[in-house]
Amino acid sequence: MHGSRSINRVYRMAQATLASLLMLVVLLSPVGAQASMTSDPRPDVIVVGDSVSNAMGVASPLIDAWPRRLERLGGVSVVNRSVGGDTTEKAVARFDSDVVSAAPKAVIILVGLNDLRRSIPMETIRANYRWMAQRALAAGIKPYLGTITPLRSPWAPIKQIDDWMREYSAQTPGVGLIDFYRALEFPPGSGMTTFIVPVDYCHPNANGHWLMTLPALSSIIASGEPRPTSLTMMAAKKPGTAGYSLSGNLQADRVGLPGQRLILQVAYPGGGFSDVSDSVSYSSARTTEPGRYTLSIPLGREARYRLRYEGTDLFAATAPTAWAQIGRAASLTTPTAPAVLSPGKAVTVSGFLRPRHASGTHPVEIRVYKYEDGSWRPRGFVQAVASGYSDYTKYSCRLTLPTMGRWRLRAYAPADADHFSRWSAGFRYVTVR
């Protein structure tokens, strides 16, 4: 009997242990594994490329490579089948195993630079592109040809094959194009790029991969709200010059957004903000890496400046930045007057104004306040007349304060064509008794 009970106890312990192990297996199973049995197992995008798409030379390729950014920002599954040193011929050889067998919804083909480096004939390269595009279409996969990215210096063969890709995709139904070349070309129209890893001539750096993500997003993600952006601006005097600089950053998803055009806006005295004409050399700025910009403003007529980003299909426009006031500002001293006055007795109030104003004009008002019932109450103003000197103006007027009490005076210069309005920095306090 005792032996039978011991056997039963061991059996029950074994059952409990097995149940615990089964529960542990369930808990450790990947989240969504059961759902994946019924969901579409196909990847959204497969990338067939070389070391450019593998982000060679970039410190964090698993984060910064453009296929990874496309996956994060686009919300699509991306499988990167890029192999360093690959040619279009090698891509053709593995196309069925790497692409067709996985049945993605789309394939992005970005190879060819190594073909050009090895002087493979242009017709061979074009034939390989055509074969991959048609093979994808036959398998129900949307093919996108990616233009070869520019180098540190312009190279004609890249332009030649990229122009062919643009023409072929435009004339072939179902074949898409992602123009990495034009996204990465900087300065625009130069046939080269500055977004290259150090000590290299062909591999984009992290900011270059960010730029490459933009046309891929635009092609793969056909809809969706533009991503929020933020724009900062700071004004500073340029050392050793008579001008100022505006600088700051443009970001999207907390990442610098290079290669984007910013619009400068200006407001002159008496007017509102408007975009500066493109005919003005400092009318716009283009962000560099990583999303920074610097814009020079010559010192001249006083104005308020700010910047805005007009946005794209992928990135939302920003509100204008806070403005900065730049130019040859007017300066106005605190008025002088006797500290103690008699009621009804006229006294002279005066001060100085820069720049010079014509004699006999009235560029300054003396604002008058009286202290009553615990606060300063405005009591009108008197216009002061200008006396022009070599590079400044003396303003003065005769002023009568009618009743006893505490008074204060402050100078105010209304805006003119070249300057915004100005107040004197301080008040002149007087007592009438």
Image (cartoon, helix red, strand yellow):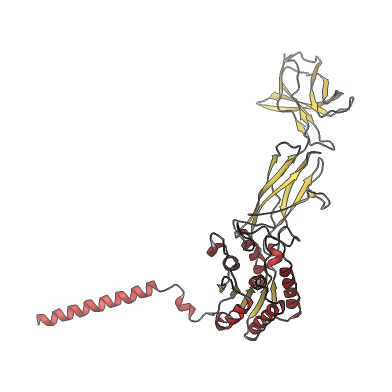
Percent x, y for residue 252? Answer: 63, 58
Residue located farthest toward the front when viewing the structure as drawn: 119
Q: Is residue 44 above or below residue 358?
A: below
Percent x, y for residue 253? Answer: 60, 58
Percent x, y for residue 8? Answer: 17, 81
Picture quarter containing residue 153?
bottom right
- Horizontally, residue 90 falls left or right of residue 426, namely left
For the point 84% across and 36% down, the residue is: 416
Q: Quadrant of the C terminus?
A: top right
- Is residue 421 something one can see in this rendering? yes
- Horizontally, residue 364 falls left or right of residue 86, namely right
Picture quarter containing residue 194?
bottom right
- Is residue 406 something one can see in this rendering? no
Picture quarter containing residue 243?
top right
Q: Quadrant of the N terminus?
A: bottom left
Q: Is residue 287 above or below residue 387?
A: below
Relative to the observer, which residue lies in front, 153 or 150? 153
Residue located farthest toward the left when viewing the structure as drawn: 1
Relative to the observer, which residue lies in front, 387 or 251? 251
The count of marks equals 0
Relative to the observer, which residue lies in front, 3 or 315? 315
- Horizontally, residue 321 falls left or right of residue 383, namely left
Percent x, y for residue 174? Answer: 70, 80
Relative to the observer, which residue lies in front, 268 or 158? 158
